[in-house]
Image: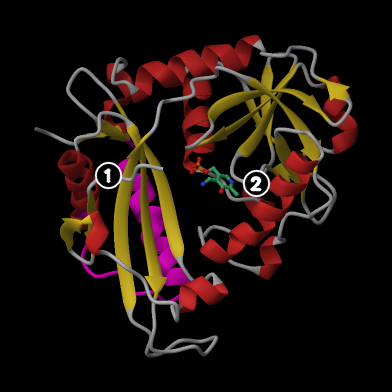
């Protein structure tokens, strides 16, 4: 992974090689960090981050959930993201921002651990629906919302995702699909689930899943394009009646699901997923003026 020559750390850009982290970092041991993953895309006006303001707002929300004080304002952190991309000279890729407790306190409730915020980027081609994937219903339950703060993107949450992804991969699948505590479909390890029945988009309610920014974008794009949307529980017994299914997420973008366990979707890559992928691609690449407020340009 080539993460570029410059990393932003605690308020300033510095050479990547000069940044290190302690073995005693609280977040390394207990998962007490929070983070965001964003994509930036090549546009006619240079690289632009997709929904930067929403990602940074969610980052502050996550940090607050674990009492991690992020210095500065949301605006200043947005600017730091743009500066990091510009400084590294990447035209399209992925950007990570992480807040974490470092050393000074190994108690579960840290009161004197050092806190840091870091931003780093790497070049990454958009996937843009190149493939369709085979999915396995996980034997791991999606962590119930009653067990955590489900709206926060906390590092510790990802133990659940890692176990589910690994199980699916080891059994020859591309990805996992986790059920919630009621046995309904929740989401993938790092993406939200959508199905299509009779030209109506259906996605589970946010009560037992991490409702992503891409999910929100897709719901809005679908609404603007006249595609009816229904927020409702989906039970695995309904899977055979789906015309198509797909995942949405910053990293995956929109990716069609061709099968779930032994159930083949009626369409390997369905027409609604293809249409949404096309719309999404135009929007993130700055080719649809209606959605320009979703883009933040890095500038010269
Ligand atoms: N669910 C989980 C568990 C995730 O980790 C992610 C990725 N952040 C998503 C859904 C999709 O969120 P977003 O669209 O904001 O990337």
Q: Quick check: which quadrant has ligand 1?
A: top right
Q: State which quadrant residue 122 falls in.
A: top left
Q: From this view, report whether residue 300 is shown above or below residue 228.
A: below
Picture coordinates of residue 104, whole percent (x, y): 38, 88
Quick check: can you spot residue 65? yes
Q: State which quadrant residue 10 falls in.
A: bottom left
> Which residue is at a point 72% across and 14% down the rendered structure image?
268
* Residue placed furthest toward the left: 300
**Residue 29: mark:** none
> Which residue is at a point 78% across and 42% down the rendered structure image?
170
**Helix, strand or loop for the magenta stretch, by majority:** helix
Image quadrant for the N terminus? top left
Image quadrant for the C terminus? top left
Query: Within 8 Å: ligand 1 and the Cβ of disc 1?
Result: no
Of callouts 2 and 1, the N-terminal one: 1
Based on the picture, tell me whether residue 57 belongs to the magenta stretch: yes
Query: Within 8 Å: ligand 1 and the Cβ of disc 2?
Result: yes
Instruction: Provide the residue designation for mark 1.
Output: 4
Secondary structure of the residue carrying numbered label 2: loop
> Which range is magenta?
50-75
Q: From this view, report whether residue 190 is shown above or below residue 241.
A: below
């Amino acid at each position: 992974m080539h993460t570029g020559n410059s990393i932003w750390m605690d308020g300033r850009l510095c050479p990547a090689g000069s940044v290190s982290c302690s073995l005693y970092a609280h977040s390394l041991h207990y998962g007490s960090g929070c983070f965001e993953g964003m994509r930036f895309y090549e546009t006619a006006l240079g690289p632009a981050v997709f929904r930067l303001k929403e990602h940074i707002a969610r980052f502050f929300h996550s940090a607050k959930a674990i009492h991690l004080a992020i210095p500065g304002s949301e605006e200043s952190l947005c600017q730091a993201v743009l500066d990091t991309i510009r400084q590294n000279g990447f035209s399209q890729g992925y950007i990570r921002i992480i807040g974490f407790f470092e050393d000074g306190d190994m108690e579960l409730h840290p009161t004197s651990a050092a806190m840091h915020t870091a931003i780093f980027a790497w070049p990454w081609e958009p996937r843009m629906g190149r493939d369709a994937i085979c999915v396995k219903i996980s034997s791991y339950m999606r962590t119930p919302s009653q067990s955590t703060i489900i709206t926060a993107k906390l590092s510790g949450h990802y133990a659940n995702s890692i176990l589910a992804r690994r199980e699916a991969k080891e059994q020859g699948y591309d990805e996992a699909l986790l059920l919630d505590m009621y046995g309904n479909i929740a989401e993938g390890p790092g993406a939200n689930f959508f199905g299509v029945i009779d030209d109506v988009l259906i996605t589970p309610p946010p009560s037992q899943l991490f409702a992503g920014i891409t999910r929100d974008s897709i719901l809005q794009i679908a609404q603007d394009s006249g595609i009816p949307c229904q927020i409702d529980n989906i039970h695995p017994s309904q899977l055979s009646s789906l015309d198509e299914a797909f995942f949405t997420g910053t990293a995956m973008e929109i990716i069609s699901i061709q099968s779930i366990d032994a159930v083949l979707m009626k369409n390997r890559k369905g027409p609604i997923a293809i249409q949404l992928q096309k719309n999404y691609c135009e929007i993130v690449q700055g080719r649809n003026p209606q959605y320009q407020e979703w883009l933040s340009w890095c500038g010269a």
